[in-house]
Image (cartoon, helix red, strand yellow):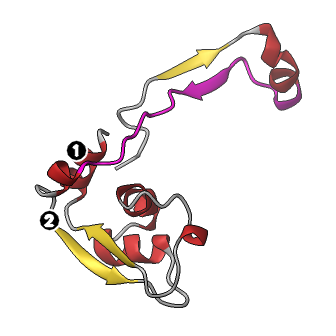
Amino acid sequence: MNRYMYTLQFDNSDSYYSYLRRTRNLLNVRHYETPVLKNPSVGERMYVTSDTHIWKYGDRFYNLAHKYYGDPTYWWVIAWYNALPTEADIRIGDVIQIPISLEEARSALGV
């Protein structure tokens, strides 16, 4: 599943992008709507089946996404669900929640 599947897309032929279009031999530039995500509340998290994971040396969001979802590109679901934008925000020994169902997680995140 492409993460841009439900995202509004539009082609921009504005003069601001004329240099980019000319150097890349493009007719227009494709833009994607920026998704507005929210951190799920405690009540919303109650309805999401999740597993706990103790962060250890060498852990990466994309490895956890591959392990739980079979697709490393869903790393952002785990990061956003825990309100931790990057691995630099986690310390060894921290406990994070990993939503088991992608559909439940996406619903709680408002995506």
Q: Front-most of 100 and 79?
A: 79
Q: Secondary structure at mark 1?
A: helix
- Mark 1, residues whose alpha carbon is within 10 Å: few (<14), some, or many (≥20)? few
Q: CA distance from mark 2 to mark 1?
A: 12 Å
Identified by mark 2, the residue type is: Thr
Q: Which mark is residue 107?
A: 1
Give the residue furthest to the front: 42
x, y (%) of residue 74?
Answer: 41, 60
Q: Is residue 52 left or right of residue 47?
A: right
Q: Residue at x 48, y 61 (%)?
A: 84
Residue tagged 2: 49
x, y (%) of residue 18?
Answer: 83, 16
Q: Is residue 110 left or right of residue 83?
A: left
- Find the magenta span and give its range: 23-41
The quadrant where residue 24 appears: top right
Relative to 27, is 79 above or below? below
Q: Residue at x 19, y 56 (%)?
A: 45
Q: Front-most of 55 and 9?
A: 55
Q: Is residue 19 left or right of residue 44?
A: right
Give the residue furthest to the bottom: 57
